[in-house]
Image (tube, rainbow, N blue to C red):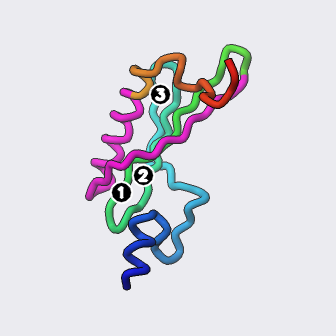
Amino acid sequence: MLKRLFEALRGQGSAPGADKSSPQVADTVEYKGCEIVITPAPAGGQYRVSGLIRRTRDSGEPEELRFERSDVLADIDSCIDMTRTKAERYIDEQGERLFEDPHRPA
């Protein structure tokens, strides 16, 4: 029993049949030239704020940023709304730095 608890706390526990490789898309929203793909992640009977932010550069090269927050909500509709809000705020705060690679030498 303790093993299952520790696995759940570390994010290793999952519901039977859950496929972490392909998150379910709940909604897609356009915001300031970006596409927000909302993919709430099941988390112990609740839903974790999770999604993708995509855009296409002027050169035509696609860019994508996956994000997952610690926020967990009881119902999927609240999670979809919160995910959209968090992604929009992230886009507003980061601007052009959003897709910069912090590991790439300057």
Q: Amino acid at mark 3?
A: Glu
Badge 2: few (under 14), some or many (20 or more) residues near its Cα, within 10 Å? many
Give me the C-alpha separation between circle 1 and circle 2: 6 Å
User: In the image, what residue occupies the spot 40% across and 21% down?
Assistant: 93
Verify CB contact (< 8 Å) between mark 1 and mark 2.
Answer: yes
Residue 26 in the image: state x and y as whole percent: 44, 49
Q: Secondary structure at mark 3?
A: strand
Q: Are marks 3 and 1 in contact (CB under 8 Å)?
A: no
Numbered circle sitting on residue 40: 2
Mark sitting on residue 101: none
Q: Nearer the viewer, residue 88 or 27?
A: 88
Residue 50 vertical position relative to residue 88 in the rendered view, above or below = below
First in residue order: circle 3 vs circle 1: 3
Return the disc, 1 or 2, that comes first in the chain's sequence: 2
Q: Amino acid at mark 1?
A: Tyr
- Residue type highlighted by circle 2: Pro
Residue at point 39% right, 66% down?
9
Q: Which mark is residue 47?
A: 1
Residue at label 3?
30
Nearest the camera: 38 or 6? 6
Q: Identify the magenta region.
A: 61-89
Q: CA distance from mark 3 to mark 2?
A: 17 Å
Residue depicted at x 28% and y 54%: 73
Label 3 neighbourhood size at 10 Å, few (<14), some (14-19), many (20+)?
A: few
